[in-house]
Image (tube, rainbow, N blue to C red):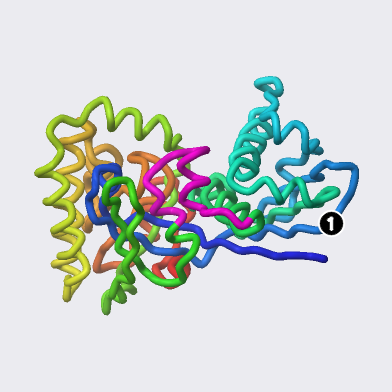
Amino acid sequence: MKQTFYSNGKLLISGEYVVLDGAKALALPTKFGQDLIVEESKNNQIIWKSFDCDKKIWFEAIIDFESIQKKEKFSEEEATKNTLIEILHEAFLLNPSFLEDSKGYKVTTQLTFPKNWGLGTSSTLINNIAQWTRVDAFKLLKNSFGGSGYDIANAQNNFPIIYWLDNGNSLVEKADFNPSFSKHIYFVYLNKKQNSKSAIASYRSKKNSISETVSTISNLTSEILKAENLNQFEKLLTEHEKIMSAILETPTVKETYFKDFKGSIKSLGAWGGDFVMVASEENPKTYFQGKGFETILSYEEMIL
C-alpha cells in the first residue's frame, strides 16, 4: 500500500528569534513544500531516496531498522544520513510500532522548491515523517532539531497564522492577513544559506533582558496585521528591523547590501540569508537583478 504525505514550506514574517521567548509571530505557508511517499518493502530496512525540485536525487541511503533503533552514527561524510537516522530514531521512541509492525519501507521525498532556498527542507521532512509514523510533529521537532516550532505549524496549516510559545507549548491561531497591497510585496533570495541552529545560538548569546522586547514585537505583529496601506506596512517592517538589529548587534540587510533602495526590506528567519521580504511602490525586479539577485518572487507566486 502506498501512502503519500505533504507539508507546506514556511516564511516567518515577524518575530524571528524572539518567538523562542514567547513573542507572537506572523508566519505564512508557501505554495512550495515537500512530498513523502511510503511503500512497503522488506529486509527490515528503509530504502530512502530524496529528490530536489529538478527531479534529481540529492540524497539516497539504505538504513537498517537496527541502525534506527540504536541511533547508529556513521562517518562525518554521511551527515545527512546521520541526521535522518536521528529523526527516525526519535520517531521510533515516540511510536515503536512503525518499525516493529513492518518488514521494511521504500521512502521517496520530493521537494517542490530548490533545497537551498530555506523554505523548510527540514521542517517539511519532520512533519511528513510525523504524519507517516503517527507521532506529534512538535515533539519530534523538539526531540531532534529543536527550534520554536512555527515551521511545523506552517507545514500543517494552509493559511496565515499567529504562532507563539506559552511555557514551551505551541499555540497557533489563524491570522487575518490578506493585504490589499500584496502586489507591492516581493520575496528576494539572497543565496546566503543560514544555519538555523547557529543563528539561534548566536541570538541566545547576545540577548539581554528580553521581556520588554517580546511585548514590543508581539505588538508589532498585531500592527502588521492591521496595516491598511503600503506606507504603514513599510514603517512597521522598518521598525521591526531596527529592534532586531539592536538585539543581534548586526546591521540590517538593507544597511548592509541595499542602502540606496527606495522601499522596505525585511529579513526573514535567520538574518542575512535565504529570502528577504521587499515592500515597495515600484516593481523592484530591475533593481535587484542589477545587484546580481535573480530569484525574485511576487507575493502571489510565493504565498499559499
251 displayed left or right of 95: left
Q: Badge 1 local density, few (<14 within 10 Å), some, or many (20+)?
A: some
Magenta residues span 134-152
On whether residue 108 falls in the magenta region, the answer is no
The residue most toward the left is 212
Residue extending furthest toward the right: 43
Asked if residue 241 is positioned above or below residue 143 in the image, the reply reads below
- In which quarter of the view is residue 77 placed? top right
Image quarter hosting the N terminus: bottom right
Figure disc tally: 1
Q: Secondary structure at mark 1?
A: strand
Percent x, y of residue 64: 80, 36
Residue drawn 18% across the image and 35% down it:
247
Residue shown at the point (75%, 53%) measured from the top left:
108
Which residue is located at x 82 percent, y 41 percent? 45
Query: Where's residue 257, x and y in %?
Result: 30, 40
Residue at 77% in and 41% down: 60
Instruction: Work out whether 230 lies above or below 100.
Output: below
Task: Name the residue nearer the viewer: 247 or 129.
Answer: 129
Closer to the camera in the image, 29 or 73: 73
Residue 81 left/right relative to 290 = right
**Where 73 sits versus 157, above or below?**
above
Residue 130 image-quadrant placement: bottom right
Residue kind at label 1, given as amino acid type: Glu
Q: List the residue tagged with mark 1.
A: 40
Where does residue 133 sit, x and y in percent of width and height?
65, 54
Q: Is residue 168 left or right of residue 97?
A: left
